[in-house]
Amino acid sequence: MSPAPSLPEPLDLQHHLAQAVKEQRPSAMKAMGKLLKEKKGVRSLAGGVPHHSLFPMKHATFTMPTVESISSGSLESWKNGTADTEDFHLKKTGPGTEDDPAGVFDLNDVLQYGLSNGFPKLIELLEELNECIHGRVFKDAGISKVFQLFVEPGVDTVLTEDYSFDTSLINGRSRGAKFFPVKTDDDGMVPEDLEEVLSNWDESTRGRKPHLIYTIPCGQNPTGSVMPAERYDKIYEICSKHDVIIMEDDPYFALQYTRYEADATKREAILAEVREEMAKIPLGEEHSHEVAKVFNDYAGIKSYLSRDIEGRVVRIDTFSKIFGPGIRTGWIQCNALFAERLMRLGEASTQSPNNVGQAILTSYLSPEHWGISGFMPVRLEYQMRRDYFIDGMAKYCDPDLVSTKPCGGGMFQFLDINIKSHPRYSRTQIVSVNEIQSQTAGKVATRKPFVGTENGDYTTNTSELMDELWQYLIDEAEVLLMPARLFLVERPGVDQTDRLNFFRATFAGDMPNIDAALKSFGEGLKRWFERG
């Protein structure tokens, strides 16, 4: 691994920390555990750890496709079960296992208490991965902890896209955060609206000016948008100007796609060319930067972390979309001050990441097995599913009733229902915000009644119609989609009902299911509109 590029020292950003975080002391017991691991000759009577000889697990073997099986860029052999495989082992050293094959880790350590920041070997591999992909290595340390780090409960408002992942918002609210939306379009967050919100923030009516932005810039959930490079640059510049921390939640970064090509023959030729390029890459740790170059050159948008020269980006990555969500392991890159405080929060809560998961991932990323090469081919599989989904939309759905822009990354298409063409669609003039609240009171299905028109002069019945359509599709077409109301972030005092005419649909499933579901969706949507 070549050294990371020289970076300026990060700014002093301590003033962004929540007061409780500033006051939290490091765990003395965890410090003792770290000392014991570093000083091998010390005899300890200090800890309360169970004795490793009494752990029942003696050996674990995991079987995975070989890294050579993906050298062509195709995963067909994975899907049909014919890929060459290799085993990697976790062995408990001691009596009875002397002749067992060894692995990257000893189960005596894997099954024991761990350090809050994780296994040093895994951290080293993740630093290599981040340096290759993002060109940055800050000091290494979820989402809930980052909100806890910066949010003063009941005081702070966090900025986010006007549609955002509901579970993350729930996490933030559980830490006392309020959220305020920034407008988005097909290319993601709109920089001009971010500037307008920050420049005109009235602390007398809205409370303290936001100093944290939560964003999913790549393969955004739920919209599927990928921000162009110039927007990354502009938003970073705005955040620097207003001293805002960027919480870059990027679970779909590895799933970026090239522009949709409707001609299937041309599309396959493009994918064949990419696979050919991938096949030329030599295997092995010494070629990790060559792998990273192909990764970044193929539909590669650079992250906020790669642009960060002030230490104001806290980047959250995960293995859930590449290795499997059940592994429940991710990693955070941020400046040393924030990382140290995140470790303190970890010491007082989760204590350490899951050791078995860490051991599996370290083996997966280690030079003895896959290295970082495994990050490449999965994106091609999901791109083919995206293309298949768009083909199905064209085949089964009336473009006068529903449209979608092919996403640039992630796992979702945001379906725009032309609800204004429905015969029962209506707009009603608003007398006051209180009137809107009284009109929508008691409508359980409409969780978030305020969605979009900036002048606030009119409200619509989009919410009621979309709820009716959603239920109709379940009952009559047997198709389930995610309604936009689950993701919309309320802008207080502004009617947003004309922003509820969307469904989130995933293309991550089996292709026969996608085909059947889109056929039913298209037919059901047409019937619902026709019945008036």
Image (cartoon, rainbow, N blue to C red):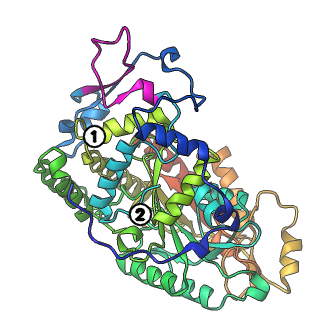
* Left or right side of 154 for 357: left
The residue type indicated by label 2 comes to: Cys
Q: Which contiguous range is marked in magenta?
A: 86-110
Q: Position of residue 108 (x, y in %)?
A: 44, 24
Quick one: which residue is furthest to the bottom in this view?
Answer: 200
**Mark 1 residue crowding within 10 angstroms, few (<14) / some (14–19) / many (20+):** some
Location of residue 442 in the rendering, given as x and y in whole percent from the top left corner: 87, 61
Whichever of labels 2 and 1 marks the residue nearer the N terminus, that label is 1
Amino acid residing under circle 1: Ser
Drawn side of residue 483 relative to residue 298, left or right: right
Tell me what residue is drawn at x 72 percent, y 57 percent: 174
Judged left or right of residue 73, residue 181 is right
Q: Residue at x 87, y 66 (%)?
A: 441
Q: Quadrant of residue 390?
A: bottom left
Residue closest to the eye, 452 or 148: 148
Query: Marks 2 and 1: which is nearer the front?
Result: 1
Q: What residue is drawn where x is 29% and y is 22%? A: 102
Residue 407, numbered label: 2
Residue that appears at 60% across and 46% down? 28
| Element under disc 2 | loop
Is residue 298 in view from this perspective? yes
Residue extending farthest to the top is 96
- Image disc number at residue 366: 1
Q: CA distance from mark 2 to mark 1?
A: 32 Å
Is residue 88 rendered magenta in the image?
yes
Answer with the quarter of the image where residue 133 lies. bottom left
Local packing at callout 2 (Cα closer than 10 Å; few below 14, some 14-19, many 20+) is many
Q: Residue 7: horizontal and vertical position, in percent? A: 32, 73
Q: At numbered mark 1, what does the secondary structure look like: helix, strand or loop?
A: loop
Mark yes or no: residue 212 visible.
no
